[in-house]
Amino acid sequence: MPQAYRTLIIDDEKPARSRLLRLLGKYENVFDIIGEAENGEEGLKKTDELKPDLIFLDIQMPGLTGFEMLKQVKHMPKIIFTTAYEEYAIKAFEENSVDYLLKPIEEDRLELSIKKLQKDQKSTNTIDDATLSRILNHIAPSDKAITSIPVKKGDRIFIIKLDDIAFLEAKEKYVFINTMDGHEHLIDFTLTHLEEKLPAHFIRVHRGHIINKDKVKEVQRYFDGRYVLILNDNKNTKIISGASYSKEIKPLIEI
């Protein structure tokens, strides 16, 4: 019987790691779990120190993303990406013969990955720089701002246009889009990632908030250099800015 893959799980969301650990625990003859990492920096360190045969790698993480981690790693194991990217971007993985699991991970899809691993047991099957670049160019072109944000609900994906968004909010480890009609939608991207991709009229006003400044109808001075921003969405949402974000807000109240 082939030796089990020495496996490292890298994901910033504890529930996602726990779910994957539970699923992999049913296949002890295939996976020997040697550790977990909760961000890209820790994943980089543990990959080079533990030298796993296989890593399950989340793509969108704070600090170093999965792709950024791979650019720095010295020991390159086999990789199965775990991703919440929208369906069209998944084609990039398929076209480059890189395995992936779409979150939330389902057991039947994991079994397909296991079959692929067993079929390619003798192959190195690691990712090279050229493949990594092709996937990056397909998924996250750096020179273009996004025009919409995908929201995954079950097996369906809804596209929310930026003009329909009042603000984005981070609560604990989750990020939500809040639309002008007052609805809230859970998404699979961090505020930091979105801040880099959103056009200039979306501004970070708090560690946990990005607002669409075109939807601000009133600004009130607060204290300690903070402001109360009142939006013109259905809820007339009030957001108190962070003290360190005053320079982002001043252009709203100056001519």
Image: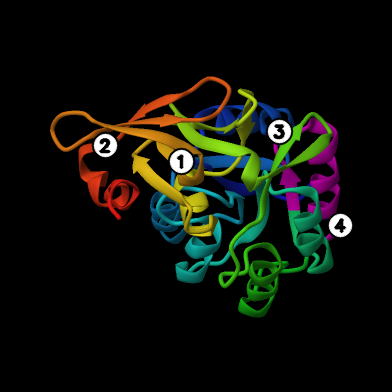
Percent x, y for residue 203?
Answer: 42, 49
Mark nearest the camera among 1 and 4 is 1
The residue sitting at the top extreme is: 235
Residue type at mark 3?
A: Pro
As measured in the structure, the alpha-carbon distance from the residue carrying label 4 to the one carrying label 3 is 25 Å
Percent x, y for residue 115?
Answer: 86, 48
Q: Give residue 104's mark.
A: 3
Q: Which residues are magenta?
A: 100-121
Q: Are marks 4 and 3 in contact (CB under 8 Å)?
A: no
The residue sitting at the left extreme is: 224
Residue in the image at 75% along x and 62% along y: 98
Q: Are marks 1 and 4 in contact (CB under 8 Å)?
A: no
Residue type at mark 4?
A: Lys
Sequence order check: which comes first, mark 4 or mark 2?
Answer: 4
Sequence order check: which comes first, mark 2 or mark 3?
Answer: 3
Mark 3, other Cα within 10 Å: few <14 / some 14–19 / many ≥20: few
Q: Are marks 2 and 1 in contact (CB under 8 Å)?
A: no
As measured in the structure, the alpha-carbon distance from the residue carrying label 1 to the one carrying label 4 is 48 Å
Mark 2, other Cα within 10 Å: few <14 / some 14–19 / many ≥20: some
Disc 2: which residue: 242
Sequence order check: which comes first, mark 1 or mark 4?
Answer: 4
As measured in the structure, the alpha-carbon distance from the residue carrying label 1 to the one carrying label 3 is 28 Å
22 relative to 154 in the view: left or right: left
Disc 4: which residue: 119
